[in-house]
Amino acid sequence: MKVVVQRVKRCKIVRKKDNQVIGRVGCGLLLLLGIKKGDTKKQADSLLDKIIKLRIMADNDGKMNLSIQDTNLEILVVSQFTLLANTKDGNRPSFIDAEEPIKAKELYEYFVTKLKEKNVKVETGSFGDYMKIEAELDGPVTIIYETKS
């Protein structure tokens, strides 16, 4: 799995086919989640545990000292297979390392469910749809996690 964690002041997702807002958060995190072939629930559990404990939210002194758990802020999770692009050869990226859509959706939904079980307010994108993301980054603060195969 590969996840890009971005601290945001606000963020919303609009599904292109019907121009509907399908996810929206205020202050919190935007997670762009790519699922590789062979990724497991155990890896998802480990990754989400790191993310909810990640101390990148500002305290009263403006220091990155608090986590999502500490602040009760929100997370918007978007599936993004393009994070797994292989660009070693030529100019066209290959997505051969990305998990098949059915398996990827299952693990994506598992990830979201487990976040909710940790009492995190979670919004999502629409798996497999073309979406527009409008985000006001905060900082900007961007952290990238990648699990081992």
Image: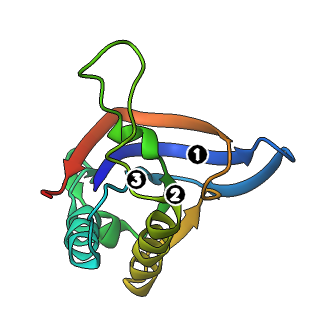
Label 1, residues with CA under 10 Å away: few <14, some 14-19, many ≥20:
many
Instruction: Provide the secondary structure element on which disc 1 rests.
Output: strand
Look at the picture and state if 37 lies above or below 112. above
In the depicted view, which residue is nearer to us: 76 or 19? Answer: 19
- Which mark lies nearer to you, 3 or 1? 3
Residue corresponding to mark 2? 76
Between the C-alphas of marks 2 and 3, the distance is 10 Å
Q: Position of residue 50 (x, y in %)?
A: 20, 65
Residue shown at the point (12%, 57%) measured from the top left: 148
- Which mark lies nearer to you, 2 or 3? 3
In the depicted view, which residue is nearer to us: 38 or 16? Answer: 38
Give, as a three-letter code, the residue at label 1: Cys
In the depicted view, which residue is nearer to us: 130 or 56? Answer: 130
Label 3, residues with CA under 10 Å away: few <14, some 14-19, many ≥20:
many
The N terminus appears in which quarter of the rendering?
Answer: bottom left
Give, as a three-letter code, the residue at label 2: Leu
Badges 1 and 2: C-beta atoms under 8 Å apart?
yes
Between the C-alphas of marks 1 and 2, the distance is 8 Å
Residue shown at the point (26%, 64%) measured from the top left: 38
Residue 11's mark? 1
Question: Which tag, 3 or 1, sits closer to the chain's start?
Answer: 1
Give, as a three-letter code, the residue at label 3: Leu
Label 2, residues with CA under 10 Å away: few <14, some 14-19, many ≥20:
many
Question: Which tag, 2 or 3, sits closer to the chain's start?
Answer: 3
Instruction: Provide the secondary structure element on which disc 3 rests.
Output: strand
**Where on the picture, by quarter, is residue 73?**
bottom left
Residue corresponding to mark 3? 33
